[in-house]
Image: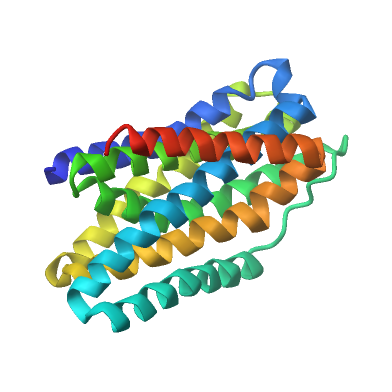
Amino acid sequence: MGTGTAFLLTLLAGLSTGIGGLAALPKRAANHKFLAASLSFSAGVMIYVSLIELFFQAKDALTAFLGERAGGWCAAAALFGGMLLIALISRILPEPDRQETKDRRQWTRTGLLTALAIAVHNFPEGLATFISAMQEPGVAIPVVAAIAIHNIPEGLAVAVPLLAATGSRRKAVGIALLSGLAEPAGALLGYLLLRPIMNELIFGLLYGVIAGIMVFLAFDELLPAAAREGGHPLTLSGLIAGMAVMAISLLLFL
């Protein structure tokens, strides 16, 4: 797949954050069950595509470059390294207060900090999407679809508090969209920096690290937030539904 097409797919994945922002416009977006279902579904998508698709793509690339034993260890190290990396980023960033309040300044702070956190998370995701899109379509399209799907509830998480704070749908959707544009920015910058040294080793490490990032975000952010909003049964149902949809979408391209 060409560089231009790969970048376009990455841009579309980033723009899906704006779709999540648009989902905040109807009144139903304030419904706790709606938000919980969106977050847990997204977590299921991320977990399945990371552990079933991205990790094994990483292992295949690394074993081809390093051999079976060394490649397997390196893939596992990349996976847990990605988890450690995003854990450190999450600890550095200030934690937004998710408790509802009528204080508009608090809603603004929550929305903007969430947008900042999502933009930081989207930057390496953009590179992963771009790298995936440069592979065969059977790998590229499911990965792009997975990232696009999980970007939708992220946009919702940004737009809901900002809409409550400002009353401006334009600002809420606009800031949600901007946080998603970190994906094509990450793709472009990462590609320019890594292009001279790109090989199976770099591909494998990137796949493993991004898989770790996505798994950590699902367990550390999305699932706990879904459980707070909708309780355990709804969270589990959304998780399984997200995994099932991702499994079907991947199988369709085999």
Identify whether 115 is placed above or below 206.
Answer: above
Q: Is residue 225 left or right of residue 153?
A: right
Residue occupying the far top of the picture = 26
* Quadrant where the image shows the C terminus: top left
Residue occupying the far bottom of the picture = 70
Q: Position of residue 10 (x, y in %)?
A: 31, 42
Q: Position of residue 19 (x, y in %)?
A: 50, 27
Residue 177 visible (yes or no): no
Q: Is residue 13 left or right of residue 190?
A: right
Identify whether 7 is placed above or below 83.
Answer: above
Q: Is residue 102 left or right of residue 234?
A: right
* Quadrant where the image shows the N terminus: top left
- Residue at 63 percent across and 48 percent down: it is 114
Residue 185 visible (yes or no): yes
Q: Along the line of sight, which residue is nearer the eye, 212 or 30?
A: 212
- Residue at 35 percent across and 76 percent down: it is 72
- Residue at 25 percent across and 54 percent down: it is 131
- Residue at 44 percent across and 39 percent down: it is 247
- Image quadrant where residue 123 sits: bottom left
Q: Along the line of sight, which residue is nearer the eye, 143 or 26?
A: 143
- Image quadrant where residue 90 sits: bottom right
Identify whether 83 is placed above or below 23.
Answer: below
Q: Along the line of sight, which residue is nearer the eye, 242 or 120?
A: 242
Q: Position of residue 119 (x, y in %)?
A: 50, 51
Q: Is residue 229 left or right of residue 174?
A: right
- Image quadrant where residue 170 sits: top right
Residue occupying the far right of the picture = 102
